[in-house]
Amino acid sequence: MDNHEETTTISIPMPAKVNPAAKKALLILSCILLSIGNCGGPLIMRLYFIHGGNRVWLSSFLETAGWPFILVVLIILYFHRRAAGKDGDNKHTTFIYMRPKLFFAVAFIGVLTGLDDYLYAYGVARLPISTSALILAPHLAFVAVFAYLLVKQKFTPYSINAVVLLTVGAAVLALHTSSDRPEGESKKEYAMGFVMTVAAALLYGFVLPLIELTYNKAKQDITYTLVVEIQIVMCLFATIFCTVGMIANNDFEVIRREATSFELGPTKYYAILCLSALIWQCFFLGVIGVIFCASSLLSGIIIAALLPVTEILAVVFYKEKFQAEKGVALVLSLWGFASYFYGEYKLIKRSSEPKIFSRTNGDVST
């Protein structure tokens, strides 16, 4: 996204030469990965709980345990740089870009992510997908608030309209929550699931702008290779956090026994665990890619806009009811998504107009 006085994101340290076409392609790819993870992650996690799984720490562990998959991406990027000679000397191409100060900052974010993983997994274990998804929708409002506080996010009427529409859509969905309590679940368990899911939305609403702030304070060029390194370190420490929880809860000792009693059989049990780890990596890689190419606010808007899609998939695969409120929320979410991108289109169009240089101070104005 071009830097402009009215743009919705602040400047991120980047290399002097950035290929606009490559950046656009990367943004599209990141949006696709984010969509796959955001819609598929909750569904595969709920599948585990529906058919006999009940280990919350294991589920939270799987949200980031797939980070070794990303090492493949890092290796590909390394050989690409080596072939292109982007580090000046092919024989001394740097494999790791991250500096110690950035490493410790990202490690802290990773611990917060691990805590958020647990809060979210607890909510999914207690609530239907349609309910947990709608509770997470105000996450966009949390992102907007923290983006304003942490990275001085600038808003346009279109981005404000998008936030309002998506938040209203979540409120409309909330009209049917009273009848969503699963059979055999106590009111206390349902209430705890509700509270933990709200806490997960609040915490991740803080984490996304914090990642963007980390980019801005890195004091080094933010390349996509560095973004991938950030993803690996963040997920590594989140996984360590959840591993400690699994050890304390004796989850490692229970996995084999739980696989044997799983309704779909041991083979599908392990397949679900592996697929869950892979899909959640798509989500996290997509999130940091969108923040790299655009802003934390856009990542929040995409997540909120995909809420109705998750609702529809829950109806199709888990036979959940599709009330009129969900249809209204779908329309509002699509409207909000369109509003944001129309605003971005206008900004890009304005920034591409001829510049006029002021004779008094040399500033560029449109």
Image (cartoon, rainbow, N blue to C red):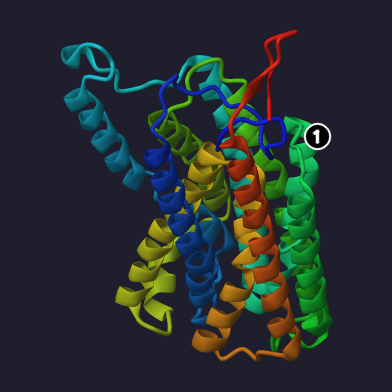
Seen from this angle, which residue lies furthest top? 360
Q: Secondary structure at mark 1?
A: helix
The image position of residue 179, as x and y in percent, is 78, 88
In terms of depth relative to the viewer, which is nearer, 287 or 251? 287
Does 361 sit above or below residue 73? Answer: above
Question: Mark 1 sits on what residue?
Answer: 149
The image position of residue 154, as x and y in percent, is 76, 38
Is residue 41 left or right of 180 when viewed as pictured? left
Q: Quadrant of residue 219?
A: top right
In terms of depth relative to the viewer, which is nearer, 304 or 279? 304
Kindly identify the amino acid type of the residue bearing the numbered disc 1.
Answer: Leu
Q: Residue at x 57, y 55 (%)?
A: 249
In terms of depth relative to the viewer, which is nearer, 15 or 2? 2
Q: Quadrant of residue 193?
A: bottom right
Give neighbour class at mark 1: few <14, some 14-19, many 20+ (Cα, 10 Å): few
Q: Residue at x 59, y 44 (%)?
A: 349
Does 137 sit above or below residue 43? Answer: above
Confirm whether residue 176 shows in the render.
yes
**Image mark count:** 1
Say which quadrant the N terminus sits in: top right
Does 23 sit above or below residue 300? Answer: above
Does 307 sit above or below residue 147? Answer: below
